[in-house]
Image: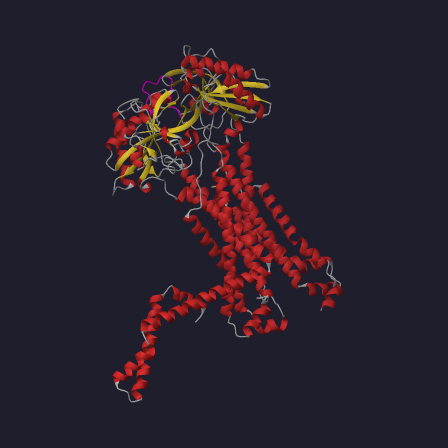
Amino acid sequence: MSLIRRTANLFGRSRVHREIDVELRSHIALRMEDNLALGMSPDEARRDVLLRFGNPIAIRERVVAVDAALALDGVVRDIRYALRQLRRTPAFAATAILTLMLGIGANVVVFGVLNAVLLSPLDVNDPQGLYQLRHKPWTQGRLLTTSYPAFEDLRRRNNTFIDMAAIYAYSAAGLSWDGNAPIEVHGDEVTGNYFDLLGVRPALGRLFHEADEHGPDSAPYLVLSDALWRSAFHADPDIVGATVELSKRPFTVVGVAPPHFHGTERFTWPDYWMPMVNEQQLEGWDYLHERTSITTTVIGRLKPGATPEQATENLNAIAAQLAKEYPLSDEALPLRLIHPGLYGDDADVIRGFLWSVTLLALLVLVAACANLASLFAARTADRSCEFAVRVALGSSWQRLAQQQLTQAMMVALIGGAAGLATAALLLHLLNRWPPAAQAHLAANLDARVYLAGLVLSLASALLFGMLPALQTRQSSPLQSMKSGPIEFLRFRRLASRDLLLGAQIAICTLMVTASLVAVRGLKRTLNMPMGFHPKGAMLAQMDLAQVGQAGDAALEKEKVMLEAARGIPGVTAVGMVNRMPMTGGHGTPIYRAGTTEFKLSDAALAPYVYSISPGYLDAADTRLLNGRDISWRDTAKTPYVAIINETFAKKMWNEGSAIGEHFILWGNLTEVVGVAENGKYHDLQESPQPAVYLPYPQGNSTDVNVVVRSQRPSSEMTAALEHTLSSIEPNVPITVQSWSDTLDDQLLPARAATVALGVMGLLAAMLAVTGIFGMAAYNVSRRMKELGIRMVMGARRTQLMRAAVGRPLALLATGSMLGLGCGMLASGLLGRLVYQANTRDPLVLVGVVGTMTLLGALAVWVPARRALMVNPSVLMREE
């Protein structure tokens, strides 16, 4: 019985037991017939048979045990033999294991991120039943759903949800306790039923509930995240029940959230949660009673039996009714449902990115398997005489193939284990990058990732182990013993190893194309016009509301800070803005002059609105195209004025001059006094959007971002700004960094795509070099005598080169052309990874051709040099 059959018997005991019972009964019947023929009575014959054979159950167990022992013994012997073979050829073993380690490690890293982001559910009760409400039009990056009063109506009137909760995300505040200096924290303001809806239980203390709320400012409670509890309070359990100050307002810490709970978004982890009824106490303005202010994200849990389609229909019917009841609002926007966790509609982009990277990583592993298949096939060809002798001595080709597969399995398991270890280290580093305050990634090696690594290892072993196993069956023992080692399938014009190398080169070319496309995309991203120039500018960020300052007092303090920053040596421009471009926010409705009913549906535009100080445009290096800059004379007591951008002017007044025109913002008639250039306000991929710049006194914001432009090194400016501003207001947390660093989140997708595709391109290039080198070196070593004879017969160097490395170079050219064509066809796939991916970019095409030419030259250099240095006399003496 073969090893495979014996191994199968280990997992098919019922079938084996039936076969043994049938065979045992046949033996008993035959012995009975013999006894009866000898003249025994039937009873004596049966008694004799039972005595001879003994207990049938015991016999059956002994046979099964022997069968299993033989199977396991065969497996152990094959494993020992495979390890001896690998130990005899350490260079071959190291190359094979390293190749698999890189291929499997890259795939495990990608799968680890994919598992953490897409496959693992949120750490809440029944995550599949949890939905987030979204407006029907696809919007990038915005999480906000509706106004708080509209949320209350939707929650009360719907009949498809068990319950709904509202979230106002990432409120910034200064946290202080026991007289300590405040630290800046970010948290979520949520409705009282938030934790009950999600099914979260506290790790320490308790959580707040809906019963704790009794109107505005009635629930000054705080739930800390596990991370903040450990970092700020050193995991002190006595903090529960203590009073802390949040933006100079007292709050009682009632509990600590469990370690694995981070809200309903995967990448942004709040430091705290507080009841939304305290929003005016913390934010300084009341959005709980404004229907025209879209401030909340709404989540809900469907009732058993209700479908998302039914819930969507029910919600839209309620929204239509609200639009009739409240004509000055715009509640009729159609709604839809998605699962929360990935920045709203950005989930589509994130999914496309991760699945595309996964596909490219699998292609790298396929290239690695093709490389190993070529190496194993060449090694099998060199051992053809050995295999022929073993067959002549009675071994079967099945046995030889089994040993070949076992050796491939050992290489795959060792390489897979090394790949898992490498992936664990890389994921650990990835979890710590980027080091933004609220940006996190929790990708770890869990059971699903380990299983994926095992499946990839076993699949790889089958991919590169089947070819040498088949070669042992297709070879001729007689020919092998007559001629010595020969190349299997040599009579075919295109051998299997040629196909493998061609496929490997094609994949490498595709990956190199993707890498260069990503580099070009990143360069386009970095060089695109943004309406401001972050290089050479520093930001000092603070919120004066955290120390209880607002109104005229805050404005005077801001003026003092600007003057102090302007006095720092080396500073060329200073300005202030309430919110930096591309750091969130949403459009604010504006109306044409003369409008009397301010319904959102009647809004002319919804521009981004910024409050700026005089000098901000110079500090940001934003060009003022027409009109004047704002000044400190533009106060809350003077007519309201604004600077608009080109898009605003074109959409409102077409090609006419916008200077002196008016529009209504926040109920105030506002005059246009300047027009600035367009810029980027939410993300780098957005189309031109309208924007408005208001004077700080008329914008009435306590958020301060001091922009300082200087030629001095950022390290010197950081220290100078911190010292200068802290001396004016020592109790406000101040964050100083270069403007370029604040854009890391926006540039992260482009940089991540470039790094991921660059690493995969490098791995594929290494595999292509080793593959071409292996074939060229093998051809030269097998044809040394032929090359010597050619040299003696007067062959030119070019002829020797063509005979030695012509085939690998031809495969390089063919595979490169095929890979370049696949790269052009993969523009849709690369478009999910790279901004404005252009696979037909002339620089990309020239770069791919040059890279593949260089790789081919490096790969064949040593084999070609060896072929040209052939010494015919030495070869003849060796013969």
Q: Classify 8 as above or below 669.
A: below
Q: Position of residue 740 (x, y in %)?
A: 53, 29
Q: Which one is in front, 60 or 2?
A: 60
Q: Position of residue 15 (x, y in %)?
A: 34, 68
Q: Residue at x 62, y 73 (%)?
A: 482
Q: Quadrant of the C terminus?
A: bottom right
Q: Magenta stretch containing residue 598, yes or no?
A: yes
Q: Residue at x 61, y 49 (%)?
A: 852
Q: Residue at x 52, y 30 (%)?
A: 741
Q: Which one is in front, 75 or 395?
A: 75
Asked where in the image residue 570 lies, by quadrant, the reply is top right
Query: Taking 516 as reference, is 658 left or right?
Result: left
Query: Taking 390 as reference, is 41 left or right?
Result: left
Specify start and end residues of the magenta stretch as a single range. Answer: 587-600
Q: Position of residue 268 (x, y in %)?
A: 42, 34
Q: Magenta stretch containing residue 596, yes or no?
A: yes
Q: Principal SS element in the magenta part? A: loop
Q: Residue at x 47, y 10 (%)?
A: 633
Q: Is residue 641 visible?
A: no
Q: Quadrant of the N terminus?
A: bottom left
Q: Position of residue 848 (x, y in %)?
A: 59, 46
